[in-house]
Image (cartoon, rainbow, N blue to C red):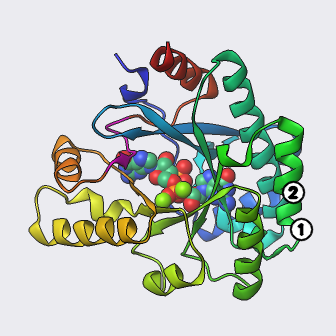
Amino acid sequence: MNPLRRRSSARPRRGHAGRDDESRLSLDLPAAIRRGQLRLEYQAELDLTTEEVLAVEALVRWDHPELGVLGAGRFIRIAEHNGMIGELGRWALRTACAQLAAWQDATPGLELVLRVNVSPVQLSDRSFPDLVEQTLADTGLAGAALCIEVTEDAEPPDRAGMIDVLRRVRASGVQVALDDFGVGRNSLLRLRELPYDVLKIDRSFVAALGTSPSESAIVASVISLGAALGMDVVAEGIETEQALAELIRLGCRRGQGYLLGEPASAEAMAFVLSARTS
Ligand code: C2E
Ligand code: MG
Ligand code: MG
């Protein structure tokens, strides 16, 4: 049995923090990074028909000493506002790249793309492409092994600057994904600003697949839009067999979600990767 399919009883707390929690988390975050309370989980992205693992997405968690395990949704916005996102992002990129390098060492022939979420605030830093290059050099990864995921929900402080940064990242062979496609602002406009490599369909569209014809029509059109633009299309948040069957029927090749595998520790993922490639 695929161990990633097991329902974990300890899913992190999701959603946004209340105001009291928020100021508390903002105060606690700098020490949390120093004290090693942050860790990454990894969620597999599969070929929907063969179940081959095509990519792995790194997702940050905070083991808060009093509040328990916090999902990224609880503190990424806070980190963007209190100035900690740069440090958090550098740590996440380095940790994830080092992890992929370790998996590659343990499993020769492993062909896997590592997807790392990056905040628009990080992308307003003109030195971000240098950080990516340096991290690849330090960990010995090829650019093609890395994909930067950009979400649309926050408006970047400097959109033109962000696009320039992403162009430079792409020039080093790294892929760029447009995350949560369909729910952010100006989704279609965003497709014109950069030749994104990957389109991730937001899970809110995937949730009702198989039960609603209009949802199927929307997802079908996004799949063909992505294909026409030469992008890899990934369905996020696949939770039901119905949604999976409908995505396959619509010709979607890639997907991730609790049905296929929950985010899991690096050790659990190593087990899956070695089992899949041996
Ligand atoms: P995302 O990049 O769209 O990541 C997918 C989110 O959906 C993750 O939540 C994942 O745990 C959750 N998920 C996966 N499969 C399913 C499913 O079948 N059903 C449902 N309902 N949810 C599913 P998570 O880890 O709480 O992350 C939330 C968001 O925080 C991410 O959304 C991403 O935008 C951001 N994030 C995560 N890690 C990082 C990071 O290292 N840096 C930055 N800047 N942002 C991050
Ligand atoms: Mg993502
Ligand atoms: Mg997403």
Q: Which residue range is magenta in the image?
A: 253-260
Q: Along the line of sight, which residue is nearer the eye, 236 or 70?
A: 236
User: Quadrant of residue 17 in the image?
Assistant: bottom right
Query: CA separation, marks 2 and 1?
Result: 6 Å
Helix, strand or loop at mark 2:
helix
For image coordinates 46% across by 20% down, the residue present is: 276
| Residue at x 54% of width, y 62% of height | 197
Q: Is residue 73 visible?
A: no
- Residue drawn 59% across the image and 21% down it: 270
Which of the labelled discs sits on residue 131, or is there none?
2
Residue 96 percent coordinates (x, y): 71, 40
In the figure, residue 209 lies in which quadrant? bottom left
Q: In the image, what residue type sits under mark 1? A: Ser
Q: Is residue 127 above or below residue 109?
A: below
Identified by mark 2, the residue type is Leu
Location of the N terminus by quadrant is: top left
Where residue 165 appears, as percent x and y from the top left, is: 77, 73
Taking the magenta stretch, the answer to whether it contains residue 186 is no
Disc 2 to disc 1: CB gap under 8 Å: yes
- Residue nearer the viewer, 177 or 93: 177
Dividing the picture into quadrants, the one containing residue 50 is top left
Q: Residues within 10 Å of mark 2 (few under 14, many from 20)?
A: some
Magenta residues: mostly which secondary structure?
loop
Task: Say if residue 131 shows up in the picture.
Answer: yes
Question: x, y percentage for residue 154?
Answer: 60, 77
Residue bearing the label numbered 1: 127
